[in-house]
C-alpha cells in the first residue's frame, strides 16, 4: 500500500456523494486490505465533518440571499428535511441511523447538512455522525468482502 493510494482513498472518502460507500470498494479493488480500506475510508469520510457542521448554516444562509442560488438551496433544504425526518424526530439516534444507512445521499455530508438545518448540538452531531460513519463503514466492508467472495 503506497501513500499515493492512501491519499487517493482519503480524498474519495472525504468527497460528497461518494464518501466511504465508494471508497471502501475502490480501495479493496486497488489491493488494499479490507481492514485498512475501512480505517482509511472512515478517517477520510470524517475529515470534513467538523468544518461542515460549523460552516453549513452561515454559507447556506448567505447563498440563499442570491437570486440564482435561492431556489437551489430552498430545494436542497426541503429535500433534506423530507429525507431526514428521522433526524428531526429522534435527533441523536436519528442522525446516527440516517448516516449509517449506506444509501446515496445519506452520508456524513448530508448528515452534517441535516444537523445544521435542525440546529442540533455540535458535539452530539459530531458523535452521531462518527458512529453513523463507522456503522456504514462496517456494512459497506461486509458487502464488499462478501461480493468479492461471490465473484471469485
Image (spheres, grey):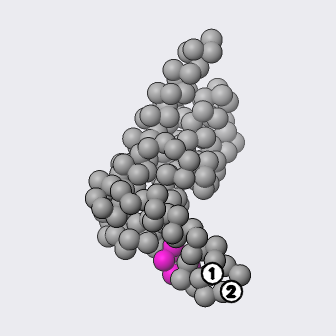
Residue, disc 2: 67
The residue closer to the viewer here, 110 or 31, is 110
Residue 126 coordinates in the image, percent (x, y)? 37, 60
Quadrant (top left, top right, bottom left, bottom right) of the N terminus: top right
Q: Is residue 1 above or below residue 74?
A: above
Quick one: label 1, few (<14), some, or many (20+) residues within 10 Å?
some
Q: Which mark is residue 41?
A: none
Residue, disc 1: 70
Q: Is residue 16 above or below residue 10?
A: below
Labels 1 and 2 touching (C-beta < 8 A):
yes
Residue at 57%, 68% (x, y): give it.
76
Label 2, secondary structure: give it: helix
Label 1, secondary structure: give it: helix
Residue 31 sits in quarter: top right
Residue 54 coordinates in the image, percent (x, y)? 46, 73
| Label 1, label 2: how far apart the Cα atoms are | 5 Å
Residue 101 coordinates in the image, percent (x, y)? 44, 44
**Residue 97: in magenta span:** no
* In this rendering, position of residue 124 left or right of residue 70: left
The residue closer to the viewer here, 78 or 14, is 78
Q: Is the magenta stretch mostly helix, strand or loop?
A: helix
Is there any visible trace of residue 126 in the rendered image? no
Q: Give the range drawn in magenta.
A: 55-59
Residue at 49%, 51% (x, y): give it.
106
The residue closer to the viewer here, 62 or 69, is 69
Residue 12 coordinates in the image, percent (x, y)? 64, 48
Quadrant (top left, top right, bottom left, bottom right) of the C terminus: top right
Residue at 61%, 88% (x, y): give it.
65
Residue at 32%, 70% (x, y): give it.
121
Is there any visible trace of residue 95 in the rendered image? yes
The residue closer to the viewer here, 151 or 38, is 151
Amino acid at each position: 500500500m503506497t501513500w499515493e493510494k492512501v491519499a487517493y482513498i482519503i480524498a474519495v472518502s472525504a468527497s460528497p456523494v461518494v464518501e466511504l460507500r465508494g471508497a471502501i470498494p475502490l480501495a479493496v479493488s486497488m489491493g488494499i486490505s479490507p481492514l485498512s480500506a475501512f480505517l482509511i475510508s472512515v478517517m477520510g469520510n470524517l475529515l470534513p465533518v467538523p468544518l461542515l457542521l460549523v460552516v453549513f448554516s452561515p454559507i447556506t444562509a448567505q447563498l440563499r440571499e442570491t437570486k440564482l442560488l435561492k431556489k437551489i438551496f430552498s430545494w436542497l433544504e426541503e429535500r433534506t428535511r423530507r429525507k431526514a425526518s428521522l433526524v428531526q424526530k429522534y435527533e441523536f439516534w436519528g442522525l446516527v441511523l440516517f448516516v449509517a444507512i449506506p444509501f446515496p445521499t445519506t452520508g456524513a455530508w448530508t448528515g452534517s447538512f441535516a444537523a445544521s438545518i435542525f440546529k442540533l448540538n455540535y458535539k452530539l452531531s459530531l458523535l452521531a455522525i462518527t458512529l453513523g460513519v463507522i456503522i456504514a463503514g462496517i456494512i459497506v466492508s461486509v458487502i464488499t468482502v462478501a461480493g468479492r467472495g461471490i465473484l471469485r
